Amino acid sequence: PMVLSGHIERLERIKPTSESEPWKVVVSLRLRLERHRGAQPVLERSYEEFQDAAGDNIHASVLAFGAAVDAIAARWAADLAPLQSKAP
């Protein structure tokens, strides 16, 4: 079985520097896919996404964190797609 591992490099809520700017969030993840634990990685990359929050409350930031993670997952899937044709 393939092994997917990773770690959070950054998970941050960023306060705006002026009232006209929105709150932002940033998510950075390092993801690694191996054919089995300890093997050379099939794919290993870092991804970072910034998202504006829809408001200044925590709930808006949580939704923005979710959107950032979704965007990273889409990029990860796109990076994996070419490898599917090379799979044994």
Image: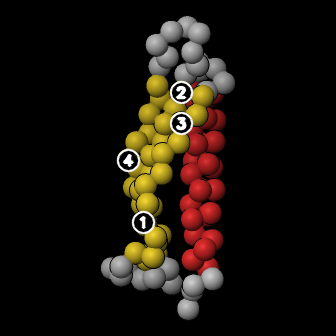
Between circles 1 and 4, the one closer to the viewer is 1
User: Of all residues shown, which one is farthest toward the left?
Assistant: 38
* Secondary structure found at label 1: strand
Identify the image quadrant of residue 52. Answer: top right
Q: Is residue 62 visible?
A: no
* Residue denoted by label 1: 44
The Cα–Cα distance between marks 1 and 4, rounded to whole angstroms, is: 14 Å
Q: Secondary structure at mark 2?
A: strand
Label 2 sits on what residue type? Lys
Q: Which residue is mark 3?
A: 50
Front position in the image: 44 or 4: 44
Which amino acid type is shown beneath numbered disc 4?
Answer: Glu
Placement of 88 over or under 25, stated as above or below = below
Distance of label 4 from label 3 (alpha carbons): 13 Å
Residue at the image point whose x is 57% and y is 15% from the top: 21
Q: Which residue is mark 4?
A: 9
Whether label 1 touches label 3, CB < 8 Å = no
Specify which label sits upstream in the sequence, 2 or 4.
4
Q: Return the x and y of residue 14 as percentages of the image width and height.
A: 46, 25
Decide: few, some or many residues near mark 4? Use Cα within 10 Å; few <14, some 14-19, many ≥20. Answer: few
Residue 15 position, x and y percent, is 47, 19
Kindly report the distance in space between the C-alpha atoms of the residues bearing marks 2 and 1.
26 Å
Three-letter amino acid code at the position of disc 1: Glu
